[in-house]
Image (cartoon, grey):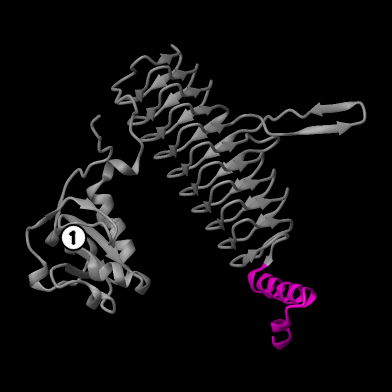
Amino acid sequence: MSEPIFITCERGLTLEQIVTLTGAAAPASARGNRILDNIAPLDSAGPSDLTFFDKRTFAEAAAKTKAGACLTTSALAGYLPANVAALIVREPFVSFVAAARDMFPQALRPSSLYEATGLAGAHVHPQARLESEVIAGPGAVIGPRVEIGSGSQIGANAVIGADVRIGRNCAIGSGVVISNAFVGDRVIVHPGCMIGQDGFGFSMGRNGHLKIPQVGRVIIQDDVEIGAGTTIDRGAIRDTVIGEGTKIDNLVQIGHNVSIGRHCVIVAQSGISGSSTLEDFVVLGARVGLNNHVTIGEGAQIAAVSVVHGDVPAGARWGGTPAKPVKLWFREMALLAQMARKASGDRTAENE
């Protein structure tokens, strides 16, 4: 069985082009027209690969690397072998990403898994309106009065419900279901997402639980990316909103009436309960849980596996269960560990 390479370099870069692209400083001997056509980590890079070195922790790997060129800092360049082109930059990883994006642009947005062109085997309602160059894979269903902008692609077996609006140059993955939603431009929705289903709302009583109608929408603004398997509930009496440029990881649950600001980052397996608000540039680590009606202030960061029960001030860094300011959380953990050692008879604790 042959071994395919799924994502290949679309265009190699010369050392001179990498220097221009990243603003790197490099001696004349490290420049030229030699082409690098791949990226790799320090320990496995070869002569045609570009790599980066930004932490002294990896000095041993750097000293042995066989990379063609390495983006690094002036303080670390001395660890590299003499035959490796050292490209000096302030932020090696950021510069590495810039070069990688130029070499592998097709990796920035999912492509059709069927390599479909046009509406290959899709079921498009006669009342749907699709602009030019829309692609839909086999088994995709596009409902009545749907509008999809030019350059967007709909994956195989995806379902776009009635009246949904999808902007231009979007990528909607296979098996995605979108209903009751407006989607902006350049939005990426990875496979298996469910967007716009009704939220979990019941009026509980001794004689049974009455389902509360969920009559809002989901509004997804431009340049949002949503990871595989994520679910976003439509609003109950107001819209669920995902702000411009926000990046959501795989397997995230976003409840009804949630408002997420611009350029937030929400990492895998986090759960955001109904009517919570994230202001701009908030970061939630993996498996964070937010209670109902919680507000996370602008620029705040919540550590992984934390549970937030109350509002978090702008710019704060909180963690723990229940979440609290990180410094207080660390002091509490240290004190508890000290108390536990004393209780177990560990005499070393007496000297702390």
Question: Is 41 situated above or below 135?
Answer: below
- Residue drawn at x 28%, y 50% is 101
Residue 345, quarter of picture: bottom right
Q: Residue furthest bottom?
A: 351
* Kind of residue at disc 1: Ile
Q: Is residue 285 left or right of residue 88?
A: right
Q: Position of residue 346 (x, y in %)?
A: 73, 78
Secondary structure of the residue carrying numbered label 1: helix
What secondary structure is the stretch in magenta mostly built from?
A: helix
- Residue drawn at x 48%, y 26% is 175
Q: Which residue is mark 1?
A: 18
Question: Is 47 situated above or below 152?
Answer: below
User: Which sits in the foreground, 336 or 36?
Assistant: 336
**332 part of magenta stretch:** yes
Q: Is residue 115 left or right of residue 211?
A: left
Q: Position of residue 307 (x, y in %)?
A: 69, 55
Callout 1: 10 Å neighbours few (<14), some, many (20+)?
A: many
Q: Is the N terminus in the top left, top right, bottom left or bottom right quadrant?
A: top left
Q: Position of residue 311 (x, y in %)?
A: 71, 59
Residue 237, quarter of picture: top right
Task: Please state the extent of the stretch shown in magenta in the rendering.
Answer: 325-352
User: Which sits in the foreground, 304 or 171?
Assistant: 304
Q: Is residue 216 left or right of residue 183?
A: right
Residue 118, quarter of picture: top left
User: Which sits in the foreground, 276 or 230?
Assistant: 230
Q: Is the C terminus in the top left, top right, bottom left or bottom right quadrant?
A: bottom right
- Residue drawn at x 16%, y 67% is 84
**308 part of magenta stretch:** no
- Residue drawn at x 62%, y 60% is 297
Q: Residue furthest top?
A: 126
